[in-house]
Every structure is written in structure tokens, then in C-alpha cells.
Image (tube, rainbow, N blue to C red):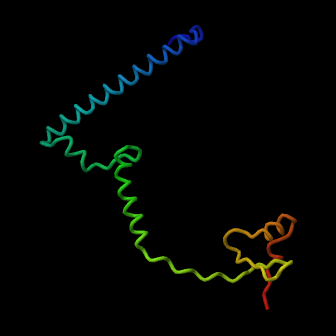
Amino acid sequence: MQDLKSYSLSDLKKLCVQIEKEIEKRATGAKKALIRKLEKMAQAEGLELSDLLEGAPARKDSKEAKAVKAPKAAKLAKAKAEKQPAEKKEALPPVYFNPLNPKEGWSGRGRKPNWVINWLGNGGELDDLKKKRS
């Protein structure tokens, strides 16, 4: 391995370009060699490589996989559009009440209202806001 400290910046950039080209060249050659091996294996079984690849699941990160997902997404969107709207759920009864305005309540689910956040921020306990409404 060479000592890279002796290289100038422009020499390092040239070397980087050469390395990238060599990596691409070797990767392409390795892919072609592997395809040839696979074709020979398929022919030995009396099959074509393209026949084998048709039924193979696509890789998740491949362009083909994305192309397959697009029609599925369209079908799902169409099915959702045709679906009847869901019935509105009945609101849960409040469990916690605003001490400054007892008409304001919170069920304890979902996002906390500002008055609860303020209460807790001032050192109050959530259980202090719980009370039975008569």
C-alpha cells in the first residue's frame, strides 16, 4: 500500500477517479461473469435464465420493485376511495377537568389540552385534576 501523504491534492483526485473507474469495471465484469454462470446452470436444467427471473421476487431497493409497488398503491387508493366512510366514534367521557373552568374536560387519551400541560408544568399532579362529576 502506498503512503498517500506524499501525494498532492490534484494527484489524489486523479487517483480517486482512476480507482472509481476500476471499481466500476470490475463490478461490471463480475456481474457479466455471474450472469454467464447462471445461464449455463439454467441451460443444464433445460431452462432459460429469463424464465427463472420472471417469477423471482424483486429486491426491495430495485427499480423493478418500485415499479411493481406503484400499481399496488394505486389499487389500494382506489379501494379506499370506494370504501364507505367510517362511522364517527362516540367521544369518551372526560376524566380530568380544568380547575379554572370545570366545563372543560379531557378523557386522558390523545393530545393533552393546554390547560393540562400548564397544570403539569406548574408542578401539579394529573390525579389532582381527576374528579367525579355530579
Q: Measured from the top left, where is residue 2 in percent x and y?
A: 52, 11
Q: Is residue 75 left or right of residue 38?
A: right
Q: Measured from the top left, where is residue 115 in percent x and y?
A: 80, 71
43 vs 107, nearest the viewer = 107
Q: Is residue 44 left or right of residue 25?
A: left
Q: Is residue 48 above or below residue 106?
A: above
Q: Quadrant of the C terminus?
A: bottom right
Q: Measured from the top left, where is residue 132 in percent x and y?
A: 78, 87
Q: What is the total number of numbered labels drawn onto the structure image?
A: 0
Please identify the quarter of the rendering in which residue 41 is found. Answer: top left
Q: Residue furthest top?
A: 6
Q: Residue furthest left?
A: 46
Q: Is residue 47 above or below residue 110?
A: above
Residue at (26%, 28%) from the top-left corner?
A: 33
Residue at (38%, 60%) from the top-left corner?
A: 74
102 vs 121, nearest the viewer = 102
Q: Is residue 134 left or right of residue 50?
A: right
Residue at (65%, 81%) from the top-left corner?
A: 92
Please identify the quarter of the rendering in which residue 79 is found. Answer: bottom left
Residue at (28%, 48%) from the top-left corner?
A: 56
Q: Measured from the top left, where is residue 32 in percent x and y?
A: 27, 29
Q: Is residue 72 above or below residue 64?
A: below
